[in-house]
Image (cartoon, helix red, strand yellow):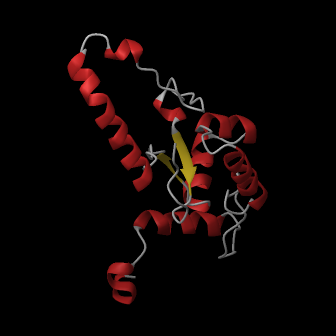
Amino acid sequence: MKAVYGDERPSYDMVVRWKRNFQSGHMSLTDEPQTGRPSIKDDLAMVKKVGVVILDDRRSTMERVVVETGLSYGAAWRIIHEELHMNKVFAHWVPCLLTPLQKQTHHDFSQQNLPHLEWNEDNLFVHLITMDKCWVYPYNPDIKEMIKEWKHPFSPLPRR
């Protein structure tokens, strides 16, 4: 075998296994069907199910995907990363930029109040009232994982 195959020859253990198979009556050279868990890549319905769970809530955790699909943690991870090509990223805070008119108004208001501050430093802020027309409720998640969102490589970054 060394003269025919050179360094690419089969190992001694492989030859012994072939001999044992031929002696027991297995004359086929093709692989027999294997038992066990089916390949995840072949199950397109499960890939779609994982995709639906994630797109339903992009902040869903791996544990939620595992519970809702019935997959193992490793299988769910493989589907998300290798089949759906998704990663989990943090949402970034994007501040609202002021328009030039708003900046000028803010500057003018500050200039008007500056003499009052110099005249009465202690009591200026007691008499100053500011208002806004909307309420902003902050979202402060308890754990860091709740901030992350799933996204495709070509989708835009999430914003908070």
Residue 36 in the image: above or below residue 59: below
Q: How many labels were placed on the picture? A: 0
Image coordinates for residue 53, horizontal then vertical, percent: 72, 45
Is 129 placed left or right of 46 in the picture?
left
- Identified at 43% across, 45% down, the residue is 95
Quick one: 79 or 89, which is closer to the camera?
Answer: 89
Question: Does residue 113 show up?
Answer: yes
Residue 154 drawn at (x, y percent): 53, 66
Where is residue 134 shown, x and y percent of the image? 60, 32
Q: Residue at x 26, y 29 (%)?
A: 114
Going by the picture, which residue comes out furthest to the bottom?
A: 4
Which residue is nearer to you in this view: 9 or 148? Answer: 148
Look at the picture and state if 126 lies above or below 84: above
> Which residue is at 61% across, 61% downward?
83
Q: Nearer the viewer, residue 92 or 11?
A: 92
Towards the viewer: 124 or 63: 124
